[in-house]
Amino acid sequence: MNEMFSKIIEAGIQAPSGDNSQPWEFRVRENIISVFNRPDRDLPFFNFAQRGSHVAHGALLENMKIAARHFGYEASLTLFPEPENEHHVADVMLVAGESSGESLYPYIFTRATNRKAYLTTPLSPLEKEALLKAGDEVGGGTVRLAEDGEARRAIAEASVANERVVLETPALRQIFFDHVVWSEEEEKQKRTGLYLKTLELARPQEAIFWLYRFPRAARLLNAVGFSRLIARDNARLYASSGAIIAVTTERDTRHDFVTGGRIMERVWLTAARHGLHVHPVTGVLFLMHRIAAGDTSELSDVSVGLLSRAHERIRSTFGMQHGTIVMLFRVGKAGEPSARSSRLPPRILS
């Protein structure tokens, strides 16, 4: 395989994905890199209709386009080129050109999820303008900012409905904790999953988190109000930011989620370029995809109501009467993350 193509794929797989699931594989034929989804990789309950994976693939494809330009290629994308194969997400056709010195390329390798508390310092006019325009080259979606304290608090308080539902729903709690990676040694071995150190928990919080693995302990902790306490603490954390950003599209097709992922990645890389950190907050969004489709299995009526009200509060805070929120994340200044998730080598099909 062409060495430059290998470098372009290597840049692509630095993309974020749900719990670092990395749901992709590749095939290279002449000047075309085909990208395929691996539906078994991401958590199925939170990945309704593979929408989370499609967002991740959008980020991967945008990284590949940026890297291609950096190495002197133009990359054209064809999404879902085989109607009969839903897992064939894209063909990336590369044509040699001139290196553009793509300014976002270095940040592909430094970008990371940062779950620390951020400063509430407002974004500067330059930062705000750059983030709002970051997705213009992609098109097909809109970047929206919630900046003032009241709006950030409203979105943060709504977003933690996810934490309550996960901790209070046995099936979801089991799925979630099955994908936690508990030690550095395990993380280096698996190179996938939700690495504990990236959660930025204090020692007492880590102890409580560990106890939630066990059904009897979880029932007791919930009975004395720990699920609500954790949600309240996370609401304060999520509100600590310069802004909360939504990437929205008009519709909710698989193309829209790939497009939203492309825009998200450009916003994230632009934030990194300006010395800002990013933390996706997506649980309510992705659980609502399932609820909106009428699949409420494993969810109580109370949980469905809680998530539905939270989703509507987020939408109304952004002033949305129609359209889809593809991604939601907070952005701001903070110390460097305590840990980063590793990446698996790319899987290349013959």
Image (spheres, grey):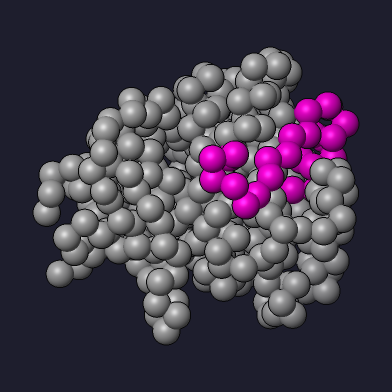
Residue located 35% across and 62% down the image: 91
345 shown above or below 289: above
Query: Is 317 left, or right, of 181 in this rendering?
Result: right
Q: Position of residue 332 (x, y in %)?
A: 63, 24
Q: Which residues are magenta?
A: 135-160
Percent across and percent down for residue 2 are: 13, 49
Position of 4 with respect to 203 (left or right) is left
Which residue appears farthest toward the bottom when viewing the image?
Answer: 84
Question: In the depicted view, which residue is nearer to us: 187 or 27?
Answer: 27
Task: Tell me: residue 144, above or below residue 79.
Answer: above
Q: In which quadrant of the rendered image does the C terminus lie?
A: bottom left
Looking at the picture, tell me which residue is in the foreground, 341 or 266.
266
Q: Nearer the viewer, residue 244 or 206?
A: 244
User: Please, is residue 173 above or below residue 60 in the view?
Assistant: below
Q: Is any part of residue 209 visible from this angle?
A: no
Residue 297 shows in the view: yes
Q: Residue at x 42, y 84 (%)?
A: 84
Q: In the rendered view, does 276 fall on the left or right side of 247? A: left
Most extreme residue toward the front, as rendered? 97
Number of numbered callouts drawn:
0
Q: Which image quadrant: the N terminus?
A: bottom left
Rendering coords of residue 26 (x, y %): 27, 62
As drawn, is 7 to the left or to the right of 52?
left
Determine if the magenta segment contains residue 138: yes
Residue 61 in the image: state x and y as whole percent: 41, 51
Q: Is residue 224 magenta?
A: no
Please give the name of the residue rendered at 88% of the width and 31% of the height, measured from the top-left corner.
150
